[in-house]
Amino acid sequence: MESVKPPRAEIRIGIGLQVLSVLAIYAMVNYLGFFHYERRDFSRSQRFALAGQTKAVLREFKKPVELIVVASPTFASPVAAILGDLRGLLNEVVFFKREGVRVEYVDPVRNPTRMQDLKAKYNLAAFDNLLIIEFDGRHRLLEIAEMGEFDMSPVANGGAPVLEAFRGEQALTAALIGLLKPEREKVYFLEGHGEASARGELSNFVDFIERQNADVEGLSLAARDTVPDDASAIVVAAARTDLDEREAAVLAAWLRQGGRMLLLLDPNSDTPRLRGLAASSGILPKNDRVLRLIELPFATGILRDVTGQVLTNTEVVRRLDQMNILFPGATQSLGVDAKLAEAEKILVRPLVQAAEEFWGETEYAPNQPDGVAYQDGIDNGQPIIIAAAADRGGVEDDRLDIQSSRLIVVGTAQFAMNASLSRQGLDFLIGCVNSLIDRGAVTGVMPKSVSRFSLNLTQEQLSQLALVVMVAVPAGAALFGFLVWLKRRK
């Protein structure tokens, strides 16, 4: 019996439908991959991931941003070591912002005509190693050499400088903030009461405030009866002596009239008027020390370095989700005066809470002979609040632009000092400052430093690695091929 062959027309139609189906699936996959994708960075230093603050700033740009890199990779200079990192950073910016950013690379050696146009347009004094950022008719110039930290010691032996850290994202984000809001805010640090020096112990913190397009100055109220009109915020950091009655009245009146203040307390100082300033806004500094017990090999120790858990209930710290902050040294807890807050319409919200094992010890004298232990009804138990914000006339939703006074109180100042400042602590502090100067939309994680990582292997480990790469892997492949050959032969 002869088999019946299908008509050629049906075969052609079937093949055509299969081809169309494959093309349709290919187009759909490419469409989804182009418009709906997610980028993840699995590198150790997260060098290919933009920081939260950078993303928040880029979202604020409603008009195109133009980035022009003026540099020649053929020049033998330390900048050549940065250009690769800079190109990677700008690629991430383009991936995130897409059509909102245009990047151009200009080599002064190979494109002198374009270079002359840029020189005339931006009035350039230098011809090389610049990043030009233009937005809405305004521009900023960044020196590429300032984006890196170099180890110059090899130069003494005839070697080249070694790039230790790339800080291009910090510089780029600061310049973008400056273009977004050309007017510079003014942040004053209170002086005259033994506070930590803005240009000394707090210089790293102050440096990052200035990168937020803000100016930092000292403020003494000894000869003033009012706070300067241009004050966007006041920082009081670790005052060792108290305010006098007049100074306290000046600051209290300024806060009630819409002032913004960051108060970093020194638990070891007796400052009742300063604490009264916090209490008048519904935040009550408690006379205790936050601590916990830890089991050591031969004894039980007291841990006074507090692990704080960020509570993401405000725009100040929302982008610090699932982040812990270490508060070294003496830390006191804070309470909330609910009756005062309700009576005066003050919205008080905790920002950071101590981990579950900590409590507020009220008998905190050092070197106690009998040790310490939590006493219910005497000591302060959980929740232990370390930082809180009070908004007079504020609303629950921080996205609403309502002018109100804001006071942020932290039960310690040690974590802000240069010797103790961590990246998480700096993220928190910068978030607080940005919220005080009405930049809540760009609060969040500060751009990170990408440091060089080197893998140090012993000679024995190098020999083992060479044995695996040169012998074990080829031998494994050869064995697998031999087994496949035997199976096919049988």
Image (cartoon, grey):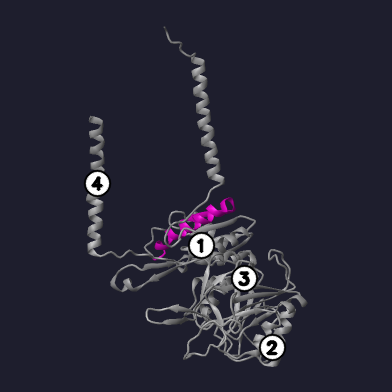
Secondary element at image label 4: helix
**For mark 1, what is the residue?**
131
| Residue 53 picture quarter | bottom right
Q: Label 3 amino acid?
A: Asn
Mark 2 or mark 1, earlier in chain: 1
**For mark 2, what is the residue?**
248
- Report, in whole angstroms, how far the alpha carbon at label 4 lies from the one at label 2: 77 Å
Q: Residue furthest top?
A: 1
Residue 241 against residue 488 in the figure, above or below = below
- Report, in whole angstroms, how far the alpha carbon at label 4 lies from the one at label 3: 57 Å
**For mark 4, what is the residue?**
474
Residue 434 circle label: 3
Residue placed at 26% from the left, 43% from the top? Answer: 477
Residue placed at 46% from the left, 58% from the top? Answer: 48
Q: Residue furthest front?
A: 376
Residue 479 against residue 188 in the figure, above or below = above
Q: Is residue 99 magenta?
A: yes
Image marks 4 and 3: residues in contact by CB distance under 8 Å = no
Mark 3 or mark 2, earlier in chain: 2
Q: Is residue 32 magenta?
A: no
- Report, in whole angstroms, how far the alpha carbon at label 1 lies from the one at label 3: 25 Å
Taking the image as shown, residue 145 lies to the left or right of residue 401, namely left
Q: Residues within 10 Å of mark 4 (few under 14, many from 20)?
A: few
Secondary element at image label 2: helix
Residue placed at 36% from the left, 63% from the top? Answer: 76
Taking the image as shown, residue 328 lies to the left or right of residue 444, namely left
Q: Label 1 amino acid?
A: Leu
Q: Residues within 10 Å of mark 1 (few under 14, many from 20)?
A: many
What segment carries the magenta color? 78-106
Q: Label 4 amino acid?
A: Pro
Q: Residues within 10 Å of mark 3 (few under 14, many from 20)?
A: many
